[in-house]
Image (cartoon, rainbow, N blue to C red):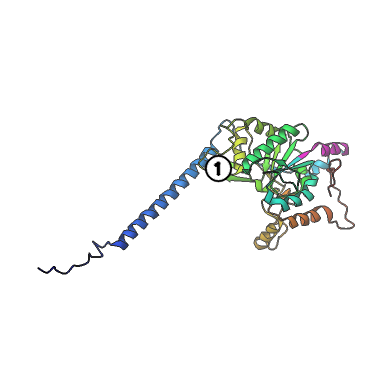
Amino acid sequence: MAAGPVHPEPVLRNGRGHNGKMLFESSSFLKGVMLGSIFCALITMLGHIRIGHGNRMHNHEHHHLQAPNKEDILKISEDERMELSKSFRVYCIILVKPKDVSLWAAVKETWTKHCDKAEFFSSENVKVFESINMETNDMWLMMRKAYEYAFDKYRDQYNWFFLARPTTFAIIENLKYFLLKKDPSQPFYLGHTIKSGDLEYVSMEGGIVLSVESMKRLNSLLSIPEKCPERGGMIWKISEDKQLAVCLKYAGVFAENAEDAEGKDVFNTKSVGLFIKEAMTNHPNQVVEGCCSDMAVTFNGLTPNQMHVMMYGIYRLRAFGHIFNDALVFLPPNGSDND
């Protein structure tokens, strides 16, 4: 008996075949991705809530700190002004990595000469430049170790501690002027503040200033992992400047935004060139006024060549016939070769 013809299995069953199965699996995959994204977003929000509400011991209203009034400085006697200028001693901490060698050289040859003392903290030994080896690539661990080293060694010699990246250019005299009426025995933590959830922190991009009292409080917490862990306590680590703010908040030290008398930031997270470019677009008739503060302390994101150009414009270029009579003069440290 001859077998009947064999018919292939239908490609579609109830509107679904191989292609339908693939579409169903793709749909499931996309749903999984969406659910995963929502979960990550929730974790991030919870992380910010944890940071923001981790310490209820201190009530603090964020406020903006401004530079002193120039007229008030003129009222001080000349002898008092001279004594005041000598009393402000700034220790500069620059965190570097071997790949930053060209920036490292530029910073060393330019603005750090105006610090009362400047030291470089590196992730490893670099023969080309003298530095303090932190033996870690983790920026938060580097920052912790640098602060601990600086406080242990120099707490009796310096009253202000300024930390920066090698892409930052700082005008130390303007920093000292800004700090004139600030008491270093009080807990100051200032720079360019950013808000992240309920946490307000000073951005490392613009440089971070701590008073010796803030350094004291921070160092008292470095050995307490519950309040100042070596690594963030969340699912993924947070940036070093945020982690610093968390630790300082436990010590009752809160971020302050530094501004001039007109409310302009003096710690800047961008280069002056970028600020001018933005001002030309946004305020074409007021480029200078719309750009930056006359008393700016820092700019960030500079190349080595731009560092040298800044040095020339700020410290070397002079208009003949103009005499600048500032009410206060900050003398360079003894033996300094600054400009």
Residue for point 61% across, 36% down? 247
Is the stretch drawn in magenta largely helix, strand or loop? helix
Tell me which corner region of the image, top left, top right, bottom left or bottom right, holds residue 202.
top right
Of residue 301 and residue 26, the one placed in the foreground of this image is 26
Q: Residue 45 in the image: x percent, y percent?
A: 49, 44
Tell me which corner region of the image, top left, top right, bottom left or bottom right, holds residue 305.
bottom right
Left or right of residue 74: residue 37? left
Q: Residue 295 in the image: x percent, y percent?
A: 75, 49
Based on the picture, tell me whether residue 86 belongs to the magenta stretch. Answer: yes
Q: Quadrant of the N terminus?
A: bottom left
Give the structural element (helix, strand or loop) at label 1. loop
Q: Residue 231 in the image: x percent, y percent?
A: 57, 38
Q: Please give the residue where the numbered disc 1 appears in the rendered image.
A: 237
Label 1 is placed on what type of residue?
Answer: Lys
Based on the picture, tell me whether residue 198 belongs to the magenta stretch. Answer: no
Vertical arrangement, residue 314 with respect to residue 330, above or below = below
- Magenta-tinted stretch: 78-90
Label 1 neighbourhood size at 10 Å, few (<14), some (14-19), many (20+)?
few
Vertical arrangement, residue 125 with respect to residue 14, above or below = above
Left or right of residue 82: residue 292? left
